[in-house]
Amino acid sequence: MPALEDLEQRLGGLDGRRILARCDFNVPLRDTAAGRLEIADDLRIRAALPTLRWLVEQGAAVTACSHLGRPAGTVDERYSLAPVAELLAELAPGIALAENLRFSPGETSNDSAYVEALVNGRLGLLRGASSAGSAPFDGYVNDAFGACHRAHASIVGPPQRLPSAAGRLLHREAEVLGSLRTDAQRPFVAVLGGAKVSDKLGVVEALLSVVDTLVIGGGMCFTFLAALGHPIGDSLCEPDFIETCERLLRSDASIVLPNDITVLDAGGTVRQMGRSLPDGCRGLDIGPGSAAEFDDVIAAARTVFWNGPMGLFEDERFAAGTRAVAQSMADSRAFTVVGGGDSAAAVAQFGLAPYMDHISTGGGAGLELIEHGDLPGLAALRDSPQQ
């Protein structure tokens, strides 16, 4: 996959060259007391800075572009990148920023006319970002790992028409997450959480072929517990996937499930219970015994991949399990990889982000790379005829 230096060589230098940089600025926004929108978590913006700053240092005229949310192909001010433009002007002066790519239906449909508009510089630029005009671009850089699982116009179109390269972030993400399939140090432990088995079935099956132990918590664990015959009360369950979970549990794979659960009972009291839950009780976190068992598994590992919280960690009553897993990873000697927005938000909330070896900016993209071994955005760069 071509690197930034390859693009520099291909263009005979970047000084004065116009570069379109596809970034992932799909950041969470929140309302302020003044009635404005502000960025709630700027991780993805800061993650793009090494690439953007390097391009500027080489003398390139850079226009960054991104999507934000799902505005359904129409202009919707709730999804404007204006708050991003304000922060970007502070962090990387001189970078132009285009308005939300998904304001056009051509972005998600990979419309060829829209791709031509992109590569020819016909982009609406936001106020607050310096304008680079509307001349054609000389090169393209993809640093939007979190969007590389989408065959959208700004991801797969420009590499067919412009000399292209992967940014620093994209290279690192592909290297780290790709190596989990092929080159992880053992014992290799994966910890999966989140709400639904159906959302992660493909990655569960892919991981079972490469990990030494798969630890399962979060809401998805209850479908597995139901597959073992345990009553799970009012906990989240996907009946259509119980048979699949039974098949996975019958395999030779090492799967570790919670042995105790933190529940909210019918009277609104938080209680600790075993695996079997009565009607009226809803499991919302793993229990302390499970946290201790998970810690033992993580402590013995040399590589740990974590995606998905162990419970409803936004509610402090049900945050202990997620906090325990994050702390176990922080204390571990293993190479630790955190994937997924919720897991990344959790380690940041607990102040443990500096102790992780790699925090991925791509939730769905990371899971699809682990599951399939490739992504449309990576393939587009690798197969670009413009190299």
Image (cartoon, rainbow, N blue to C red):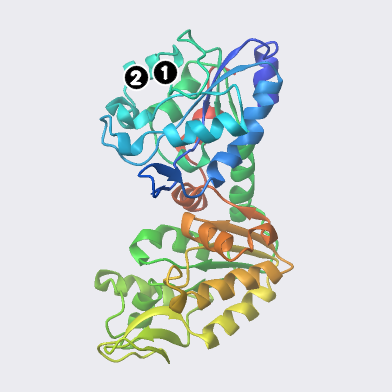
**Residue type (three-letter) at the residue carrying disc 2:** Tyr
Q: Which residue is mark 1?
A: 118
Tell me, for residue 342, which label it has, or none. Answer: none
What x and y, as percent, mark residue 2? 63, 27
Mark 1 closeness class: few <14, some 14–19, many ≥20 residues within 10 Å: many
Q: Is 331 on the left-hand or right-hand side of 117?
A: right
Question: At numbered mark 2, what does the secondary structure look like: helix, strand or loop?
Answer: helix
The image shows residue 234 at horizontal and vertical percentages of 27, 82
- Name the outermost residue toward the right: 333
| Quadrant of the frame with the N terminus | top right
What x and y, as percent, mark residue 263?
38, 85
Extreme top residue here?
A: 135
> Is 236 rendered above or below residue 279?
above
Disc 1, SS: helix
* Identity, as a three-letter code, of the amino acid under mark 1: Leu
Of residues 221 and 188, the one drawn nearer to the viewer in this rendering: 221
Residue in the picture at 52% in, 47% down: 373
**Quadrant housing the C terminus:** top right
Q: Are marks 1 and 2 in contact (CB under 8 Å)?
A: yes
Q: Is residue 2 visible?
A: no
Quarter-of-image position of residue 174: top right
Structural distance between the alpha carbons of marks 1 and 2: 6 Å
The residue sitting at 45% across, 15% down in the picture is 119
Residue 53, relative to residue 112: is it above or below? Answer: below
Q: Which residue is mark 2?
A: 114
Q: Residues within 10 Å of mark 2 (few under 14, many from 20)?
A: some
Is residue 23 in view from this perspective? yes
